């Protein structure tokens, strides 16, 4: 397999960077004395999961039932669906509970708890659930200090469902720009979920699992006290946004989109790529970074995985990407037909657009990894 022979656009995965990112997060969790439950929503691949899984923990998190079914098919025994369940999804959740030793999902409110309890009783399935608490993102989850928390635990305790523990995700860590501010959100995340666990224990419930985490809070937290596991995901791939907020270095991004220069546009001068919105995604998260807007992605040399100065994808149509250039010398450096790699703003959005990875080692494609997608 040669880079020049690959049909573009296609997704590249640098294996050495993936491995280094996984080792770094494993060491980080070890230093914090918490387990690592890698969230596979970003890479959605069993080959990547085998590298990411912490052998002292063994489990993964996923964001869709389809991912859960895919990883169950590939023999993963501990899968946490880190999204609130609803009544319509319970039959698939029950099928997973019967298939693998430890499937679990989130319950974020009294309605869902009632649905789980009724379904578990009717079907005789001991569904394992985590009560999700809201640590400040205000997306899903019950208040850690509210009455509903205890009410949910009571409903579950009166049914065959099993309480796996309490969980939270401080997604609002993405709004912060400094390491200190992210560390403060990490502390909010930790204190919300450990506080909820404490309240439940005082009310007589057994709480073993205390699960938290995003990539920024896992990297910047100052303490893991009271947590049993962290659940970051995007760190495996890395991306331009995470590099900008200090979750990893600029040279740690493991995924990129291989693309071909298909035209030289004039007036205004620009390169046209065959990677547009469907290959890169329309994520513009770096636009929120003061002075750090990287358009729809940053252009790099695909073999060396090093950036070409500050060339960025400035516009996208469905299958076209436009790279504005300030100097026509770029046309000679990047002629029509040449391959470039585009580092993504948000790896989760970009990888979701593709059904496989071309695995790169030492700048050369060495294999293909399948991945899942959809719901
Ligand atoms: N847990 C939950 C519930 C999430 O929604 C996410 C990401 O969206 C994560 C963990 C992983 O966080 P990150 O993407 O920052 O690694």
Image: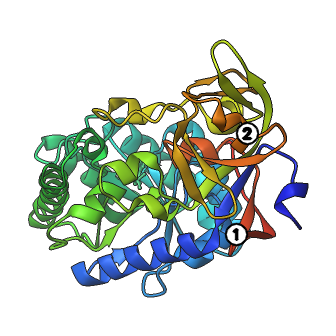
Secondary structure category for the residue under label 1 = loop
Instruction: Evaluate whether residue 101 shows in this view.
Output: no
Which mark, by number, is residue 213?
none
Residue found 61% across the figure and 34% down from its top = 281
**Labels 1 and 2 touching (C-beta < 8 A):** no
Res 332 label: 2
The residue nearer to you, when weighing 83 against 16, is: 16
Tell me if mark 2 has few (under 14), some (14-19) or many (20+) residues whose alpha carbon lies within 10 angstroms of its own: few
Which quadrant of the figure has residue 290? Answer: top left
- Where residue 305 sits, quadrant-wise, is bottom right
If you read the primary sequence from the N terminus, does the residue marked by circle 1 or circle 2 appear first?
A: 2
> In what quadrant of the picture does the N terminus appear?
bottom right
Which quadrant of the rendered structure holds the C terminus?
top right
In the rendering, at what x and y percent does residue 25 appear?
38, 73
Q: Residues within 10 Å of mark 1 (few under 14, many from 20)?
A: some
Give me the C-alpha separation between circle 1 and circle 2: 23 Å
**Location of residue 148 in the rendering, given as x and y in whole percent from the top left corner:** 20, 41
Q: Position of residue 11 (x, y in %)?
A: 71, 52
- Residue 279 location, x and y as percent? 70, 37
| Residue drawn at 30 percent across, 43 percent down | 174
- Above or below, comparing residue 375 to residue 227 in the picture: above
């Amino acid at each position: 397999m040669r880079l020049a022979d690959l049909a573009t656009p296609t997704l590249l995965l640098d294996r050495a960077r993936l491995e280094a990112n996984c080792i770094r997060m494993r060491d980080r969790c070890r230093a914090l004395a918490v387990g690592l439950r890698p969230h596979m929503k970003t890479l959605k691949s069993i080959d990547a999961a085998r590298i990411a899984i912490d052998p002292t923990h063994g489990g993964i998190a996923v964001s869709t039932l389809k991912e859960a079914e895919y990883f169950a098919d590939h023999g993963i025994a501990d899968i946490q669906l880190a999204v609130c369940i609803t009544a319509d999804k319970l039959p698939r959740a029950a099928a997973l509970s019967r298939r693998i030793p430890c499937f679990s999902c989130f319950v974020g409110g009294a309605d869902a708890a009632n649905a789980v309890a009724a379904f578990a009783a009717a079907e005789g399935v001991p569904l394992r659930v985590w009560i999700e608490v809201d640590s400040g993102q205000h997306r899903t989850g019950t208040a850690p200090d509210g009455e509903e928390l205890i009410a949910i635990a009571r409903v579950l305790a009166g049914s065959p469902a099993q309480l796996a523990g309490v969980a939270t995700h401080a997604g609002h860590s993405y709004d912060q720009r400094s390491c200190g501010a992210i560390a403060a959100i990490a502390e909010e995340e930790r204190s919300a979920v450990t506080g909820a666990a404490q309240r439940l224990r005082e009310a007589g419930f057994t709480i073993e699992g205390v699960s938290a985490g995003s990539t920024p809070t896992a990297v910047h937290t100052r303490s893991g006290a009271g947590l049993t596991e962290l659940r970051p995901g995007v760190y495996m791939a890395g991306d331009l946004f995470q590099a900008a907020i200090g979750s990893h270095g600029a040279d740690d991004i493991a995924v990129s989109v291989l693309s071909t220069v298909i035209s030289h546009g004039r007036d205004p001068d620009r390169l046209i790529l065959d990677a547009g919105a469907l290959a890169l995604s329309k994520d513009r998260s770096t636009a929120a970074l003061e002075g750090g807007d990287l358009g729809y992605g940053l252009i790099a040399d695909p073999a060396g995985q090093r950036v070409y100065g500050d060339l960025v994808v400035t516009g996208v149509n469905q299958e076209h990407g436009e790279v504005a250039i300030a100097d026509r010398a770029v046309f000679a450096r990047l002629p029509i037909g040449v391959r470039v790699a585009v580092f993504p703003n948000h790896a989760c959005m970009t990888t979701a657009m593709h059904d496989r990875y071309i695995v790169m080692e030492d700048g050369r494609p060495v294999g293909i990894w399948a991945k899942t997608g959809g719901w």
